[in-house]
Image: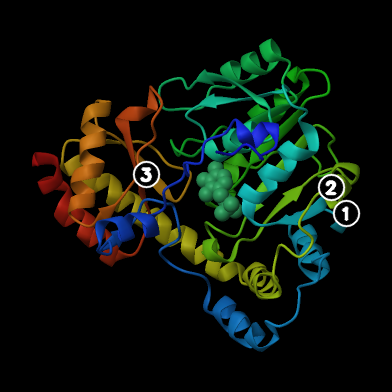
Amino acid sequence: MPHRFAAIPAALSDAMPFVGPDTLERLRGRPFRARIGANESGFGPSPSVIDAIRRKIPEAWRYGDENGHALREAIAEANGAQVENVVLGEGIDGLLGLTCRLFLNPGDAAATLTGAYPTFNYHVEGYGGRIAARPYRAFAPDLDALFGAARESGAKLVYLANPDNPTGAVIPGAEVAARLDDLPEGALFLHDEAYAEFDPAAALPVAADDPRVIRFRTFSKAYGMAGLRVGYALAAPDVAAGFNRIRNHFGVGNIAQAAALAALRDQGWLAEVVRRAGEAKARIAAIARASGLDPQPSSTNFVAIDCGDAARSTALVAALEARDVFIRRPGAAPLGRLVRVSASSAGDLDVFEAELPQALTA
Ligand SMILES: *Cc1c(COP(=O)(O)O)cnc(C)c1O
């Protein structure tokens, strides 16, 4: 029994809320032929990133720069910000946890949409916060619902992934920015930009110094470095400095820092990945339509496909898994009718194309 745990974790479950493809492979006793469910970039990192990693391996004995200074400078330059605006962390997931720890007292509310990216809720609950959520409107995030939940609960944090996971939809950044004055007094707006590279429309036209907002970016998706765990937040300098009170100072290793620096310097690769992802999304949509399913528009590196009802999407994920194809589906209504398929290599999509019709009849 967890009788020695502190009060907040004592009330939480031991069950891992996120079951990844590696665990599924172990449980199944065989590998997937197409791993297209976690929005990893099947196109991989840039060759120059692989090279930078190779060159850094002999220095694996060293701790990385705890200030990540060179990388933060490059990030600041790429974003028209100052180094004081940049917080490094172990991916957006790690930074969301720190954000909850930095701003939430036990019992404080945090607003999101029902079925939005779940790691935010995980951290809110992990620090004793309280989720205030309202549903999506059809298959798109609903700003009225989000700001309504925020106002009603007096939320201290208001979270939006834009472009959105799991729907792939985007809200133009200008539309989001126009709502920031509707935040409850003292609330912070968290703009999760994990897929920003795939659609410039999501860019939030606010200064890095804007005290109302923290923006989150990652090297996991378009840059193809999910396994290295590097992300960053852009925030007003006093907010950014606050993270130094609680962050894991050596949390981003020297190999990961060198890789991220090389990734930023290879914008040609980024453009190529965005182009390939666009082709892959068009192909996924065509494959879905050929089977009578309804693919949704996507500003990300995946396509959400409407299967008509939740029973059918649930059965489809299971039938594809039985055919060694890993995809995912969101749980909460009205999103439960969707399955989510990641843009990936032609080989992965060949497998998807071959297996989808059979999985649907199974
Ligand atoms: C994938 C994803 C993340 C996770 O990013 P990491 O930097 O790998 O932790 C965060 N937010 C959204 C919306 C995502 O889809």
Nearest to N terminus: mark 1 or mark 2: 1
Percent x, y for residue 33?
A: 25, 63
* Residue 176: quadrant of the picture: top right
Percent x, y for residue 98?
A: 73, 44
Question: What residue is pinned by disc 1?
Answer: 84
- Given the image, on which type of amino acid does mark 1 rest? Glu
- Given the image, on which type of amino acid does mark 3 rest? Val
Point 16% across, 43% down: residue: 290
Question: What residue is pinned by disc 2?
Answer: 240
Above/below status of 333 relative to 291: above
From the image, which quarter does the N terminus lie in? Answer: top right
Dot 2 surroundings within 10 Å: few (below 14), some, or many (20 or more)? some
* Residue 60: quadrant of the picture: bottom right
Nearest to N terminus: mark 1 or mark 3: 1
Residue 303 numbered mark, or none: 3
- Separation of disc 1 and disc 3 at Cα? 36 Å
Q: Tags 2 and 3 in contact by the CB under 8 Å rule?
A: no
* Residue 261: quadrant of the picture: bottom right
Which residue in the rendered view is the most extreme toward the top?
152
Tell me the element at label 3: strand
- Separation of disc 2 and disc 3 at Cα? 34 Å
